[in-house]
Image (tube, rainbow, N blue to C red):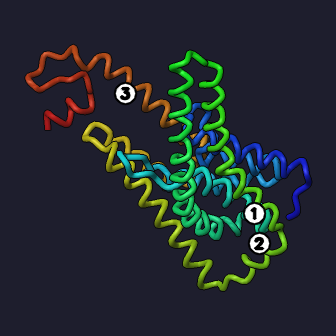
Amino acid sequence: MTLNIIQVILVLIIAFLAGMEGVLDEFQFHQPIVACTLIGLVTGNLLPCLILGGTLQMIALGWANIGAAVAPDAALASVASAIILVLGGQGKDGVSSAIAIAIPLAVAGLLLTIICRTITTAFVHFMDSAAKEGKIGVVEMWQIAALCLQGIRIAIPAGLILAIGAGPITKLLNSMPAWLTDGLSIGGGMVVAVGYAMVINMMATKEVWPFFAIGFVLATVTNITLIGLGAIGLSLALIYLKLSKQGGSGNGGSSNIGDPVGDIIDKY
């Protein structure tokens, strides 16, 4: 698929915003589900990019910056893989290949992240010097420059992929043998499961395990749509909040902490 100039500009703007949001965390443009969906919207490939974004979001759930350890770059992985998916023109059939390409890109994006943060260290010294002299405008200028640098970190790779064009990317994707694409599809599914398992490992407590079990069982019922599952989840959350307000009024001998599910489990 070939993009026109307006679509190219819009994709680059989305890539720029995704790069800035990687440090701002305000509008969440860097999240895969948001970045991929926006790129799919402006390029006319909403459904494939939405599937790609949702899958990458499940993978990125377990990514987090801990101390000096920097997580893989979800913004670069999302933007680059979405562009490759669009240019490849394979639609939903190209999602598995795009996911396989996204993982190495996320790791490679760490190098760009480290370079940008090293450069912005110098900006901080400039801002300190300006602050000592009371030049608030200069401080704001360097802050905006640092944010723009983060945006350029994603926009430049996106521009390079767009410059390559649809032809070479389509040939690359079509040249992949079936055993490779099938293996990448299976591996991508396993990575999604690992990402979600990491989240469960961090969130799982005896109070929320029943809700996990209910969700897994309901997910196997194919007649329930995503809207129906969302309504069920919202209803369970409201019931839980209502019971939580009443949980602390009991006179039982258990260690009541205001959590009705936890109190019930403690009794058993």
Residue nearest the viewer, comparing 156 with 260: 156
Label 1 element class: helix
Q: Can residue 191 be seen in the rendering of this structure? A: yes
Q: Amino acid at mark 2?
A: Ile
Q: Determine contact: label 1, label 2, CB under 8 Å.
A: yes
Horizontal and vertical percent position of residue 44: 83, 52
> Mark 2–mark 3 contact, CB under 8 Å?
no
Height in image: 133 above or below 254? above
Query: At numbered mark 2, what does the secondary structure look like: helix, strand or loop?
Result: helix
**Residue 48 seen in the current view:** no
Residue wearing tag 2? 169
Considering the image in quadrants, where does the C terminus appear? Answer: top left
In the picture, the disc for residue 240 is: 3
Query: Camera-side residue: 213 or 55?
Result: 55
Which is nearer the N-term, disc 2 or disc 3?
2
Left or right of 261: which side holds 117? Answer: right
Q: Which residue is mark 1?
A: 161
In the foreground, 77 or 58: 77
